[in-house]
Amino acid sequence: MSDDSGVKSEVTLDPKFNYEPCNGDFVMRKSTLQTFMYCQRYFYYAFIRKMPPVEDTSSGTPAQLGTDFHAESSEFYTKVNLDVPMTYNYLRSLLPFDTQTDAWYDNFAAFELGRYNDIVMKKLDPALYFMPLANELYIEIPYQRVAGTIDRLWRLEDGRTMIQDIKTGNVVKNKTALRRELAFYCHLATEDHETMEKFGPFGVISAYSPRDNSFWIEDLTPRTLEAMYGWWELVDYETRSRNNTEQWLRNPFGFCENCGYSHPCWVEGETTLARQVPVTPDDEKTNTTTGWESKATKDEEWRR
């Protein structure tokens, strides 16, 4: 991001945005924003009702594999010795073997070696630029009731700090949602005085996926911040305005496979549908069964 003179600028937050916290003890996180856009029923059970999901937490589940990679890749930097020759075999030896995701760790070691060689070629100090400024940095802003954990913070040559998210899926699958997620992290880092003083200024966002060894980086733009705040305001408004189960369960569901709320969602959801007013002839253009199509289309537009 730059001004008319071409000089890199810092991220500035929208002073008009209302940071008033949500009702009760609800805390806004990146995961709450994501969940609301993909499945408002799951959002209701997880964040409003605070029901524990019935989930498979065994080592082979996608969620657990992702959690394991986050932990191992974070610990990786505590094991790196910059005084020894930096080779692929050395870096790979610092990561787990004989796992379901060995290919992820293979990719990660190769990516880090390439990054190290690039730093050396530019005659930069690896201690400053190869090692992250922070790993798994948790930030909480109580007066705004927002919180989150930033995967990585990196020092850049131009003096700014890059915020990075580690994705165990495909990074480029939905760049619009990814930008908003990283903008939320930038809000946390910028609004938290201690983080800003220690690591700022911020203004660059990125993501890395070990699944396909893909990397994505760009300047955070005012447009992305504005979209994120709109996303935030929508979730905040809906959370305030809906005061009963029926108002939440009349919304379409999103990702049902392996969902930890399948049983209550099905039982309560069907009961809610049975109580809804039958569709009129004018409504038949939306959906002759539930009348959800127009709402689902609106939600899909937000997801994009």
Image (cartoon, rainbow, N blue to C red):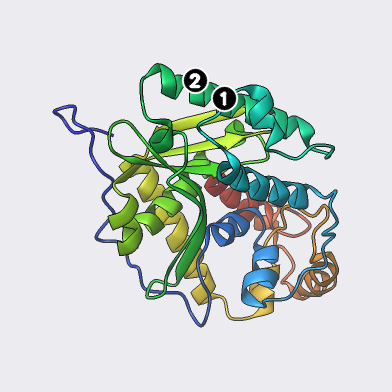
Residue beneath disc 1: 86
**What's the amino acid at mark 1?**
Met
* Residue in the picture at 78% in, 37% down: 101
* Residue in the picture at 47% in, 39% down: 131
* Residue in the picture at 75% in, 73% down: 52
* Residue in the picture at 83% in, 55% down: 258
Residue 9 placement, left or right of 232: left
Residue lying furthest left: 5
Q: Are marks 2 and 1 in contact (CB under 8 Å)?
A: yes
Residue beneath disc 2: 117
Image quarter of the C terminus: top right
Q: From what the image shows, is residue 61 above or below residue 110?
A: below
- Give residue 159's position: percent from left, percent from top: 28, 37
Task: Quadrant for residue 92, please give it.
Answer: top right
Q: Residues within 10 Å of mark 1 (few under 14, many from 20)?
A: some
Task: Quadrant for residue 76, please give it.
Answer: top right
Residue lying furthest front: 83
Label 1 sits on a secondary structure element that is loop
**What's the amino acid at mark 2?**
Asn
Q: From the viewer's side, name the closer residue of 205 and 303.
A: 205
- Give residue 93's position: percent from left, percent from top: 71, 33
Q: Earlier in the sequence, mark 2 or mark 1?
A: 1
Residue 187 placement, left or right of 106: left
